[in-house]
Structures are given as structure tokens and as C-alpha cells.
Image: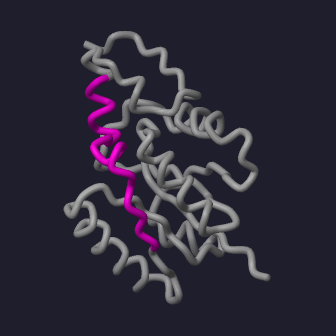
Amino acid sequence: MSNRIAVFPGTFDPFTNGHYDIVLKALKLFDHLIIAIGYNANKKHLFSIEKRMEWINAVFRNEPRVKVECYTGLTSVFCKKNKVEFIVRGLRTSYDFEYEKQIARVNEHLNEGMLNVFLISDENVSSVSSTIVRDLIIYQGDYKSFIPKEIVIDVEPLQ
């Protein structure tokens, strides 16, 4: 029996209930899931990679099939280095699908045999994005219902 391992890449700045929903769905399909926190030079990060790793590890501390890692560079290279053939991506909207489809085609071109698995987020979390949660944190809105309860963000008001 083969061990099916997938990578769920993203910046997870911060990790949201939408991400959590996708992880739970992915664990129904795969034996192990690597949540891969990528450094994206095009995005302004609010939280350090170390803090994001700490939070995600706390969320999944009782789930041995989840591993959290960070990486720089191309996701396809990270997958090849870790001998992973599956990339999991969450979809909230049709816009997400069009964007992710382009990336999936490139990843599959770069890694022969690579498969991208798109999972649709539940309706109750489909409006949640890290960008919205970051804005709520920055402007002191109520963000706590959009992140897993294990994540405690003690942020000084950012002005």
C-alpha cells in the first residue's frame, strides 16, 4: 500500500478557518499532508514565518499526519525535493479556480506526474481570506471568528 502525501502550499498569513477546512478535507484523501509555508516576495507579510509555523503546529498538535514546513522558491521544486506528487489547493470562488488552474498547469509541466487537487471550501468559510483577516487585525476589527481557536494573536494595534 502506498503512502499518499500531499503538499498544501500557501503563505497562511494568518492561517484561517478556510485553510483549516481544506486541511480536514485533504486528510480524507491523503495519508499525510505537508502544510508548506512559502515566502512570497510579492506579498507583504504581517506575521513572521516562525509565528505562522507555531500557530499551525498548535492547531494540528494532535494530528500526526500533518507536518508544517517552510520553503522559498517554486512549489514544484519543494515537491520534487520532498518526493510529493500531489498539490492541494483550496477554492473559494471562480476567480480562485482560474488563478489556480494557471499555476497548476505550470507545476504539472515542471514536474511530470504531478497532480493538483482542488478542494472547494465550505460555504460558511468561503468568504474568509487571509487578506481580509489581516485587515481586521490591522484595523482592530473582530477577526477571532475567522481563525482557528488555537491561534491566539496578541497584536499591538498597528497604526
Extreme bottom residue here?
112
Residue 33: quarter of image: bottom right
Tell me: residue 112, above or below residue 155: below
Residue drawn at (39%, 32%) of the image? 146
Image quarter (top left, top right, bottom left or bottom right) of the C terminus: top left
Query: Residue 12 in magenta?
Result: no
Q: Residue 153, image x and y in percent? A: 48, 21
Extreme front residue here?
123
Residue drawn at (36%, 44%) of the image? 125
Q: Residue 56, image x and y in percent? A: 58, 39
Is 150 displayed left or right of 3 in the figure? left
Extreme right residue here?
1
Q: Residue 63, image x and y in percent? A: 71, 47
Residue drawn at (26%, 61%) of the image? 96
Query: Residue 128 in magenta?
Result: yes
* Count of numbered circles on the image: 0
The span shown in magenta is: 117-136
Q: Residue 85, image x and y in percent? A: 58, 78
Is 14 displayed left or right of 139 in the figure? right
Residue drawn at (30%, 73%) of the image? 101
Is 125 displayed left or right of 98 in the figure? right
Tell me: residue 9, above or below residue 84: above
